[in-house]
Image (cartoon, rainbow, N blue to C red):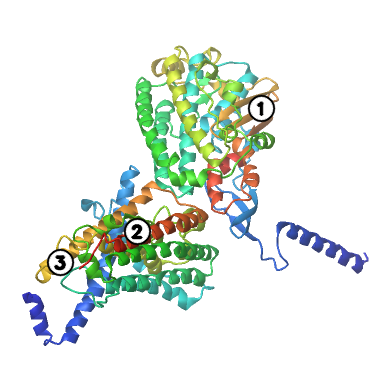
Amino acid sequence: MEVDSKSISTQALEELSKELIQQRDLGITEEGERLIELQIGPTHPGSGHMRIRVWVDGDIIVRCDPDIGFVFRTIEKLSENRIYMKTIPLVERPSLLDTTPMTIGYINALEKLMGIEPPPRAKYLRTILAELTRIASHLYGIGIFAIFLGHSTGFMWGFGDRELFVELANQLSGARITYAYVIPGGVRRDMPQSFPDNVEKALRYFEKRLPDWYKMFLNNPVVEKRLREVGILRKNDAAKLGITGPNLRASGIEYDVRVADPYEAYDELDFMVPVADEGDAYARALVRFEEIKQSINIIRDALRKMPGGDIIHPQIARMFNPLMKKIYEESRRVKFPGVFASLKPPKGEATARVEAGRGEALFYLVSDGSPRPYRFRWTTPSYRNAILFKYLVPGHRLADLPAIYGSIDYFPPEADR
Amino acid sequence: MIQEILLLKELLGNNEMIYRTVIGLGYMLIYPGLIMIVIAAALLLWAERKIVALVQLRYGPLWISRRIGGALQGFADLIRFSFQEVIIPRRSDVIPFLLSPGLAILFSVLPIAFMPVSPYIKPPIHSDIGLLAAIAVISVAPIFIVLMGWASDNKFAFVGSLREALLIVSYEIPFIISILSMGVMFGSLDFYEIVERQSLLPGMLLNPFAFLASFIAMLRVTSRFPFEISEAETEIVAGPYTEYSGLMFGLSMGLAYIKLYVYALMVSLVFLGGWLPIVSGEGVIGGFLIPSLIVILKLTVVSLVAVFLRAVYGRYRIDQAIRIGWIHVFALSIVSLVWSIILVYGGWVRWA
């Protein structure tokens, strides 16, 4: 083929000029010295692997581009090759600090497909574990946030106090982080006798610690100075960008799936949805603390209103063999009947929404009648909040990037799935 | 005059020159100079970690020398640093890269030569402008920190050293003004006269503004929280020290503690009355050891307060820190100067 050298050169010129125009728009001089591109990450800049590409003009960030996908684990595709039961631990893995709400969402979708509803006691137990996880997740987020600001006490306290709730979850479910507690039709085991007392003890201790937290972290003049008026997310921007969770509520929009579309026992429990109007990093931290307080209320209320009875749907309990029945009656533990191995929900599709620690998570499950899901779609809150980097960071100083990153409580594995 | 010193004098054949050299070397290298500083820095590091751990509900250093609460941790770290490989980046400017940590430490320790710790044994250079000279010498040290970052050829080190340069300028000036305002008030720049004139009231009560301003400035100059901005770990790795390893890293990390020791010594002499309440003592024990231990005690209190702040505060953003430096601390130092002038010319303080 004959090559027209002239046309190529004009093409190249055009491309070059386009590039130059683009550079000029970014404020780069012809020497290319005005802006510096910084790569923050991808080796663990915060709470997981992601890269943040930042263009700075001096100390001011001009453009910020979150580069996600470094911990993409093909959860949705993996689940299509597994039986339904094996996807329960799978959905826990990406959002490792916030596992129960995710399993609840998946199981809710599955239960909708199967057409069963768990007994009330199971619902309450699920709710309690979800709230314990929410507190633990918020404390983790605040700890990471604190160390981003150089506040090592917040970091240590966050991780130390989180231990309380991790330990409580351990007592309830038998695991510290990945509980796989929620199963179709109920929960894996009943709470131990001493559990309500231990919860009360832990909550009382933590409530005594909360004033210290406020004194040391939220009302700390240095922390306030770093966070106020930083990374302001306006109400209409938050709605337009589809932000979710505490970040949305810190911008003044009162939206919580637990209230808007109640699942499990949330419609029977007393709690408020904390909202702040400022929309800055400080408001986001504040909303997380207020949510912890509300979660404490929820746990107390749920323990008070805890109904008796079964923890597994009678339809499933019917399939227990005598040994399973004995174990269930003696120690209130559910052994999986054989039907779980070849669980075949009828053809159809179902969606479920939950309010996870970082925001709303959506689960969409399609069954074709086989033992494996035809399609499993899962949208996580971190994925929806990732866009904030692009809109909140520009115009701030480089040292504000950690503050904004910490304040949106972004967790890369959860976003990448 | 006590026997020991006489004995030493006799031993050296009563040669004043050799005697002063030996005493001077001992003063600079052993106590309260280099070796004491290294010991103090290691212990201070341990104390800092222990105090912060107390606030953060954990143990802190524990396993090395368990019986005394891990107090030897600092020395263990020092030994580890000394035997680690020193890696010199290929693109670094080798000579400044290797020399600057040592020089920074040298200029941080040198002010000891002007600063007395006791009425009996005088510092090697006993000058009537000792205060000014000590400040002048120690303000050379940051230049080498900037040089470290420049010689490393590393983005983070460079950013860190630029931050250091910016912040040092905005905090050393208030420090110098507030310390010198004490000189104005005491009518002298001689440490001996300054200490003597605090026998009724310590300097921090005579001029609290100067004390506050110089304490805040000291926090920044020695890289304490909330001004630990040039080494901000979550932002720029280790700032100017990013490329250093092994002993060089140990030196550059210890630098902040060495500076803290020297600055705290200056603060305890000028504001806390030095070796007072002891006015003058006899001999090595009464005239040197006990007064110097009192000085060390005051110095320790000052530096413990400084390191404790790590548990309380996060770090400021650099623009906020500079604004605080130039608006609040600088204004405070000017106020302290005016206060001193008012006190002197109003006849409130009168020195014989």
Residue found farthest to the front: B346
Label drawn at residue A365 = 1
State the SS at label 3: helix
Residue labelled with disc 3: B289
Quarter holding the N terminus of chain A is: bottom right
**Could you classify mark 3 by the number of other residues whose Cα lies within 10 Å: few (under 14), some (14-19), or many (20 or more)?**
some
Residue type of the residue flagged with mark 2: Trp
Q: What residue appears at the point 69 percent right and 65 percent down from the top-left corner? A: A32
Quick check: can you spot residue A133?
no
Residue labelled with disc 2: B339
Labels 1, 2: front one? 2
State the SS at label 2: helix
Q: Nearer the viewer, residue B272 or B345?
A: B345
Q: Dividing the picture into quarters, in which one does residue A175 lie?
A: top left
Q: How many marks?
A: 3
State the SS at label 1: strand
On the image, the x and y values in percent for residue B319 come to 52, 55
The chain identifier of the residue carrying mark 2 reads B
Residue type of the residue flagged with mark 1: Leu
Labels 2, 3: front one? 2
